[in-house]
């Protein structure tokens, strides 16, 4: 049974999420603030964390940063902040997904299932390292190197890059990327895809992912 930690200071939301995920077959633990959340996270192993942003003692961004110092456990951030900068900050803290309040319970469950699926299921049987320009992608070790230096990517960023590497020259619309990488029907706007691509470009530091205006993105074929 997969274990999920909910870190949320609003008791009503906390209770509803716990009931939702318990009924869906997950083992669920809860924490009321950021400090208690970090303590719970350090005391036990979890498959996923649902993390509120606005909390007393320690906010979600700080909690996410602390967790990422020692773990790559998937983190979905929950927040009433729906502006682009708030989302960018969440992904810069290496969160795997972002859900804005108010949200439907069905949507939360779909996000949880999608993140767990793409994190713990292998998307390929390939064993060979894929090289593009000065970037190397190792499917076995789930690692990415630029000029020999390992680059820390989130699960989602890795899956996006892997998809582009396997399909050089193919143009993917944002809907394509959501359906293939996220694994659920897109609900909301296109900011999430745009932000992940932006972060991926910044981390790689290599000009390789092209924006096809009005269509989507592609990795140009090497000459």
Image (cartoon, helix red, strand yellow):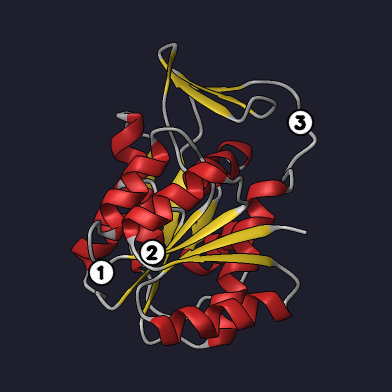
Measure the C-alpha gap from mark 3 to mark 1.
Answer: 41 Å
Q: Residue at x 52, y 40 (%)?
A: 158
Give above or below for 106 relative to 202.
below
Give above or below for 137 relative to 219.
above
Q: Earlier in the sequence, mark 2 or mark 1?
A: 1
x, y percent for residue 139: 66, 29
Q: For the residue carrying disc 1, how many other residues have a C-alpha within 10 Å: few (<14), some (14-19), or many (20+)?
A: some
Report helix, strand or loop for mark 2: helix
Give above or below for 78 relative to 154.
below
Q: Nearer the viewer, residue 172 or 193?
A: 193
Relative side of 183 to 88, left or right: right
Measure the C-alpha gap from mark 3 to mark 2.
Answer: 28 Å
Relative side of 127 to 148, left or right: right
Q: Which mark is residue 155?
A: none
Q: Which mark is residue 126?
A: 3
Mark whose residue sits in front, 3 or 1: 1
Q: Earlier in the sequence, mark 3 or mark 2?
A: 3
x, y percent for residue 192: 38, 64
Q: Residue at x 21, y 72 (%)?
A: 83
Q: For the residue carrying disc 2, how many other residues have a C-alpha within 10 Å: few (<14), some (14-19), or many (20+)?
A: some
Q: Residue at x 49, y 37 (%)?
A: 71
Which residue was labeled with disc 2? 192
Relative side of 86 to 20, left or right: left
The quadrant holding residue 108 is bottom right
Report helix, strand or loop for mark 3: loop
Q: Residue at x 26, y 75 (%)?
A: 82
Report helix, strand or loop for mark 1: loop
Q: CB of mark 3 within 8 Å of CB of mark 2?
A: no
Which residue was labeled with disc 1? 54
């Amino acid at each position: 049974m997969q274990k999920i930690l909910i870190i949320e200071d609003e008791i009503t939301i906390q209770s509803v999420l716990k009931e939702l995920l318990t009924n869906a077959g997950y083992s669920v633990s809860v924490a009321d603030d950021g400090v208690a959340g970090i303590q719970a996270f350090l005391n036990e192993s979890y498959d996923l964390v649902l993390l509120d942003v606005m909390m007393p003692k320690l906010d979600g961004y700080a909690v996410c940063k602390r967790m990422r110092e020692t773990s790559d456990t998937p983190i979905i951030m929950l927040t009433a902040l729906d502006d682009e900068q708030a989302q960018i900050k969440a992904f810069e803290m290496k969160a795997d997904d972002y859900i804005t309040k108010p949200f439907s319970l069905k949507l939360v469950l779909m996000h949880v299932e999608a993140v767990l699926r793409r994190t713990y299921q292998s998307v390929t049987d390939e064993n060979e390292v894929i090289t593009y320009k000065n970037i190397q992608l190792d499917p076995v070790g789930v690692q990415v190197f630029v000029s020999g230096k390992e680059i820390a990517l989130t699960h989602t960023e890795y899956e996006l890059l892997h998809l582009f590497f396997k399909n050089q020259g193919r143009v993917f619309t944002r809907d394509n990327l959501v359906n293939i990488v996220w694994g659920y029907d897109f609900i909301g706007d296109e900011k999430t895809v745009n932000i992940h691509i932006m972060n991926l470009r910044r981390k790689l530091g290599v000009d390789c992912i092209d924006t096809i205006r009005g269509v989507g993105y592609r990795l140009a074929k090497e000459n």
